[in-house]
Structures are given as structure tokens and as C-alpha cells.
Image: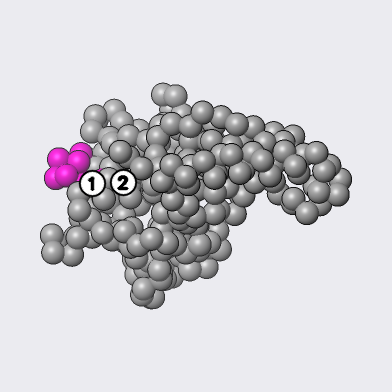
Amino acid sequence: MTLVAQDVVVRQLTEHADLLATQRLFESIWQGDTPPVTAELLRAMTKAGSYVAGAFDGDVLVGACAGFCSPPAARSLHSHIAGVSAAARGRAVGLALKLDQRQWALDRGITEISWTFDPLVRRNAHFNLTKLAAEATEYLPDFYGDMHDGINAGVESDRLLVTWRITEPVVPRAVAVEGSVALGIEDDRPVRETPSGTTVLVAVPPDVETLRTTNPAAAHEWRHAVREVLGGLLAEGARVTGFNRSGWYVVERSTR
């Protein structure tokens, strides 16, 4: 069980067939006269060691993201383009791609990821600034000039540059949506599970004050379940690193 059922597998893309599928995915999203990126460009980026990844639902590519690195001293990655198919929206595919990109960057000693977005698009502002805890760092008037795709044609291409400082403590707390469930919830009742891995999730009821009145037995059950599971994890040396909006404690267990 995971907190967000993404149902996708994210992996790096190197084969021509996958890169061509990425080009076609982006073409279907932006619907312009020319593709936002070509398979040939993506091929060159992968050869140069840049980030090119896709999210797959089975054998179907449903999302992709590509970026290139800044000069070595900057220890930064610029995420140039990311897109998710219309059929896969609402399934946290974009988040899965950003989490993969973050881990890819951390594995290479990169500490910042930047990208741009249209500041008028509310959902993107919320995703970038709230969900990912990135920081708006620069306003870029008409940054790309005239664009001729189906999304941006006929409007000035103002963009907001965001910087995602991926080693800051606020970031893993903000994006901690996956993990191995130690205590879940079903029909308002706690459900104990056997967790694996280092990131562990512990649920609490949505409204325990009301539950104490409407179902005292369930409230009592929650008290002892959280005491046993969360208290037990802390007694073993684990640390609570966050609490997300969906009602889960995010706990990091020792890797020893």
C-alpha cells in the first residue's frame, strides 16, 4: 500500500523507441507544428549524461521529463520539459517524475533543480511552490518569445523561474507521499501492516474528536494502535520527519 497510488514505473530512457515515444507524447500534449523536442535531441542528451526519464503504465509511456546540467560548479540541473498524457492526469505521474529527478540529481551531487512555468497557471503554481516546496527566484518576461504550439500560441511567454533546493529539509517533508505503510486506515479503523524500507507511514483518523463521540471503541482502538506502532518505531530509533496533508506521519527508520 502507498499513500498515493501512482501505478507507474519511472525509468531512464536510452532506447530510440522510447525516445521516439517521448517525442510523440510531447507532440500530443503541445500540439504544435514542430515537436517541443525531438528523439534525436533526446538521444544526444542521454549520451551527454543528461536527465531523460519516462513514466510507464505497463508498456505505455504516460509521462516524460528531460533536463540538462549547468556548469559543474553550479551543481544544478535545469529541467527543460515535462509532460503527462491527458489519460494519466490526476494519478500523480508528474510527482513521480519529479521525485525520480530529485533522486537522480542527489545521486550525482546536484543540489538544485530549476525550471520555468507560466505564472498564470494556478495548478502549476500550487504544484511547484506548495507540493514540491520550490522557490520562485526570477520573473522572466516573454522568455521564449513567440511560441506556436497549441498551448502557448498567441500569448506572450512570461515565465516564473523556480529553484528547487533538493537537499533542504523542507523538501522531503513536502514531497513525502510514498512509503511503506506501518499503520493504515480502512472504514475508520486502524490496520496494522508489515512495513519495508526506510520510509514508513503511520495514519491517524481524519477527526478523532468526532470519532470519540460517535464511535468511542474505534477512537480507543486508534489510541492503542498509534501508541504501539508510532511509539514502537520511535523507541527503535526512528525519526518523525513530517506530517502530510493526507493525515500520515512520515517516519524515517535507521538504515543500520
How packed mark 2 is, by other alpha carbons closer than 10 Å (few <14, some 14-19, many 20 or more), is: some
The structure residue drawn at horizontal position 84% and vertical position 42%, both measured from the top left corner, is 215
Q: Residues within 10 Å of mark 1 (few under 14, many from 20)?
A: few
> Which percent across, then down, holds residue 133?
44, 62
- The percent coordinates of residue 150 (x first, y second) are 47, 53
- The segment highlighted magenta reads 43-51
Q: Is residue 187 left or right of residue 247?
A: right
Residue in the foreground of this view, choosing between 37 and 126: 126
Q: Indicate which disc residue 1 carries.
A: none
Note whether 59 is above or below 239 in the view shown.
above
Q: Is residue 84 visible?
A: no
| Residue 201 drawn in magenta | no
Residue at the spot of label 1:
107
Image colouring: one colour
Residue 27 rendering spot, x and y as whole percentages: 40, 43
Q: Residue at x 62, y 43 (%)?
A: 226
**Which residue is under mark 2?**
103
Percent from the top left, x then y, of residue 132? 45, 57
Q: Compared with residue 237, is residue 114 higher up or lower down, i.e. above or below?
A: below
Q: Nearer the viewer, residue 189 or 60?
A: 189
Q: Name the element at disc 1.
A: helix
Give, as a three-letter code, the residue at label 1.
Asp
Marks 1/2: CA distance? 6 Å
Q: Quadrant of residue 184?
A: top right
Q: Residue furthest top?
A: 59
User: Would you say 19 lies left or right of 31 here?
Assistant: left
Residue kind at label 2, given as amino acid type: Gln
Marks 1 & 2, CB-CB < 8 Å contact:
yes
In this rendering, would 41 be left or right of 29?
left
